[in-house]
C-alpha cells in the first residue's frame, strides 16, 4: 500500500523516526544511569511499547486500566498505572496484581490508602503502590515539604497489605516553558524535589524508587542524581507543541495526519481539508509561545499554510496572501503536524506505519478505560 | 446495571430527554412543513438515528463514509454524505449509490464536478449530488449571488451522469450568536439566501430540493418558506455551548460524562476527576459569551464547580472559595455537561443509556472514516 492509497484522514507514523526517538531515550536513560519506564499512553500500541523498551519487555507506565489489561495480555509483566486510584477500580487492580509480576497503583491521599488497605486485607493480597508527589505542577500529588506526606509514606511502608514501591512525580509545568533552557530548569527542580523527598524518607528508614517523568524534562535534563527511573511518553511522536517550546526539531516528529484538499477558495486564500476536530483534536497547542489566535497544526513542507480552524470534519487552512491557491487541486494530499500527538492519536482506530511513501504496518491502539 | 456500577469515565445518554429532543424536532419540521433529514454525526448510532426519524426509516445526513456504510447496512435507504467529495472517495460513493435507494454526495467546485462526472460515465451510473452553498459561514460552498454558482448548478442539472438533487447550506455562523434572537436572525438569513437561490435556479428551469440545517437555526427559526428540508444534528444531545448561547435549557441536555473524584485538594479548592481531555475533548465552548479563560464543562447540580483544566486523563475542577472541598470523598460520582457533545461522544467506544439511575441500553457508535 502506498500513502496515496490511504483513506483520509489517516494517522501516519514514520517508523524510522519513531525508532530513532525510542533509541535516543533508551540511550539517554543509560547515560543518566536511571531506568526507563516509558509511558505508553501517547500511542497505546504493543508495537510502540516494544520499541520504547528496546530489547526486553521491562516496566512500562500506563494511564488507564484498559492500557494495563492490553499490555498485560501481550506479556508486559511490570506495569505502573499512573493515575490516582479510585475505589471502584480496585477489583481490576487486584486482578492485574495477580496476573503481572509487578503491578503498581498510584495514591496521593490517606483516604485512597484506606480504600486500598481495606480491599487488600479482605482479599489477602499485597497491593503495590507509588506515592504521587507534587513537584510544582499543582495537579495531583502530596506536598513533599509537608509533614503529612512523610506520614502517609510511613503508613504505606508499614502496612502489611500495601507495599510502597516508589515516589513519583510528573513535572507538567515543563510544558509551560518557552525554551529548552527553561525546561532544563524545570527538570532540575523536578529532580531536586524528588531526590530530597527520597532522602527524607530514607532518613525515616523508608527505601523507595524515585521516579520522575515528562518529555520536556527527560529531553533537557542533564543529571538525575538521586533519581531511579524516568517515565517520558510523548517523545515517541513529539508534535508541534514540543517543537514550539524548543524541545525537538520538526524533523524529529514521527506522527502526522494525512489529509486531502476538499475545497479551494482562492478569493479568501483558504482551503478546506478532510481532517477536522475529530482527526486533529482541538488542543490549542503551545499558546504561551504562539501568536493568538491558536493554530491547530502546521502543514509539512508548506510554511505558507496553517490550520486556522476546525469543525467536526472540516479543517480550514489559511494560506499566506501571495499563495497561488488556485493551483491547489481538490484531492491533493497534505500532511499536518498536530499540536498534541497524544490527543490526536487517540482519535484514530488504527495507525498507518510508513517507511518513505510505503505503508509497512498497521498498529491498533487500545481505547477506552 | 446501576449508574454507580459503571467504569468511569462513561458517556451517559438520558433516554427520555433524547427521545423528547427527537420528538420536538420532528414536530417542528412538521409545523414548518419541511422534511427532516437529521444529521446523525453527533451520536453515530443506529438506535439514535431511528429515534431521530420517528416511525419510518427516512432520509438522514452523515459526515463520513464510515457513517454512510454503517447506516446503509442497518437498512437506512436515503443517505446524504454532506462533506465535499474528494475523488479518492468516489469508488465507495458508487458502491453506496448502487446499494441505497438514494445516496447523495456534496459538491461545491467545478473540479469536483469533473471528477464525479468522469467517474460516473466510466461506470455507467448516475451519481446524485447536492450543491453546497455558502449562506454566510465562509467555510465551504459556492457564493449564491455569483454567476458561477448558477453555471455550476446548470452544468450538474444538464449532465447525463450527474443528478442535481438539491442545494444545501449549513449556517454555522449561528454558533457565533449570543442569544436566541440572534440565532433566529441567522436562521432567517439562511432561509432567505437559500430560498432566493432556489428561485434563481427555478427561473433557469432547474428544480431542486432546498436544504438548510444547523441546530441553533432549526431551534429558533419561525418560517422556512421556500425551503424543503432541514438537517440539524446536535439537538439530540444539546450541550453547554447550546445552553450558553440561549438555544436550550440545561434540563434539555441529554448527554453527560460520568466521572469519579480521584483527588481532593482543599488548600487550593480543587479536585481531580477521572475525565480528562480524552473523555471531554478540549473544545473551549462558547468563548464568545463566556468569561476567559475557557471552562471545559459544568458539573450537574454543582454550580460551585467548573472544569478549569484538562490533561489527557485528568480533569481539574475548581470550586468556589467557600466550598467545603474537604467533604468531597475520593470516588464520589459527578456528572459533567460537556461543551460540545459531538466531539465528546466521539471519544467513547460505547454509550450508557440511562433511565433514572438504571442503565437500560448500550449504544455503539461507528468510528473512523
Image (cartoon, coloured by chain):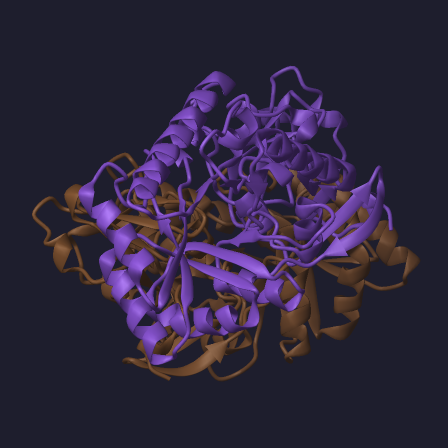
Chain colours: A purple, B brown
Q: Nearer the viewer, residue B178 or B42?
A: B42
The residue that appears at 34% across and 33% down in the rendered structure is: A196
Q: Is residue B62 above or below residue B182?
A: below
Q: Is residue B369 above or below residue A334?
A: below
Q: Nearer the viewer, residue B161 or B289?
A: B289
The residue most toward the right is B122
Q: Nearer the viewer, residue B348 or B83?
A: B348
Q: Is residue A187 left or right of residue A45?
A: left
Does residue B87 show up?
A: yes
Count of marks placed on residues: 0
Please state the horizontal and vertical placement of residue B72, each as a whole percent of the image. 67, 74
Q: Is residue B264 left or right of residue B42?
A: left
The residue that appears at 67% across and 19% down in the rendered structure is: A323
The residue most toward the left is B322
The residue that appears at 70% across and 26% down in the rendered structure is: A251
Does residue A295 show up?
A: no
Q: Nearer the viewer, residue B150 or B217?
A: B217
Q: Quadrant of residue A158?
A: bottom left
Please state the horizontal and vertical placement of residue A139, each as a whole percent of the image. 32, 43
Please state the horizontal and vertical placement of residue B350, each as a whole percent of the image. 50, 70
Please state the horizontal and vertical placement of residue B114, each as a whole percent of the image. 81, 45
Q: Is residue B255 above or below residue A196?
A: below
Amino acid at each position: 500500500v502506498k500513502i496515496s492509497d490511504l483513506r483520509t484522514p489517516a494517522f501516519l507514523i514514520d517508523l524510522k523516526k519513531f525508532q530513532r526517538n525510542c533509541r535516543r531515550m533508551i540511550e539517554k536513560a543509560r547515560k543518566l544511569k536511571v531506568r526507563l519506564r516509558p509511558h505508553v499512553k501517547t500511542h497505546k500500541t504493543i508495537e510502540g511499547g516494544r520499541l520504547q523498551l528496546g530489547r526486553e519487555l521491562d516496566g512500562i507506565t500506563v494511564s488507564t486500566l484498559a492500557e494495563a489489561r492490553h499490555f498485560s495480555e501481550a506479556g508486559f509483566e511490570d506495569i505502573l498505572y499512573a493515575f490516582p486510584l479510585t475505589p471502584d477500580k480496585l477489583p481490576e487492580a487486584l486482578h492485574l496484581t495477580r496476573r503481572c509480576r509487578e503491578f503498581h497503583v498510584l495514591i496521593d491521599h490517606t483516604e485512597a490508602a484506606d480504600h486500598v488497605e481495606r480491599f487488600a486485607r479482605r482479599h489477602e493480597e499485597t497491593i503495590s503502590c507509588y506515592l504521587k508527589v507534587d513537584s510544582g505542577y499543582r495537579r495531583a500529588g502530596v506536598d513533599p515539604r509537608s509533614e503529612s506526606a512523610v506520614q502517609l509514606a510511613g503508613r504505606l511502608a508499614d502496612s502489611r497489605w500495601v507495599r510502597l514501591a516508589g515516589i513519583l512525580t510528573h513535572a507538567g509545568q515543563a510544558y509551560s516553558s518557552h525554551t529548552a533552557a527553561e525546561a532544563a530548569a524545570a527538570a532540575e527542580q523536578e529532580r531536586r524535589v524528588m531526590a530530597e523527598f527520597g532522602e527524607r524518607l530514607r532518613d525515616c528508614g523508608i527505601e523507595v524508587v524515585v521516579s520522575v517523568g515528562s518529555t520536556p524534562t527527560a529531553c533537557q535534563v542533564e543529571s538525575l542524581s538521586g533519581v531511579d527511573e524516568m517515565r517520558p511518553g510523548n517523545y515517541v511522536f513529539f508534535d508541534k507543541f514540543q517543537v514550539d517550546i524548543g524541545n525537538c526539531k520538526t524533523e524529529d516528529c514521527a506522527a502526522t495526519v494525512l489529509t486531502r484538499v476538499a475545497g479551494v477558495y482562492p478569493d479568501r486564500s483558504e482551503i478546506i481539508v478532510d481532517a477536522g476536530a475529530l482527526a486533529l483534536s482541538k488542543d490549542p497547542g503551545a499558546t504561551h509561545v504562539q501568536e493568538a489566535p491558536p493554530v491547530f497544526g502546521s502543514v509539512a513542507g508548506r510554511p505558507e499554510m496553517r490550520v486556522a480552524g476546525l469543525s467536526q470534519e472540516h479543517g480550514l487552512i489559511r494560506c499566506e496572501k501571495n499563495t497561488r491557491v488556485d493551483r491547489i487541486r481538490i484531492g491533493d494530499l497534505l500532511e499536518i503536524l498536530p499540536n498534541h500527538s497524544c490527543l490526536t492519536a487517540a482519535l484514530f482506530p488504527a495507525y498507518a506505519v510508513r517507511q518513505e511513501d510505503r505503508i509497512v504496518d498497521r498498529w491498533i491502539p487500545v481505547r477506552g478505560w
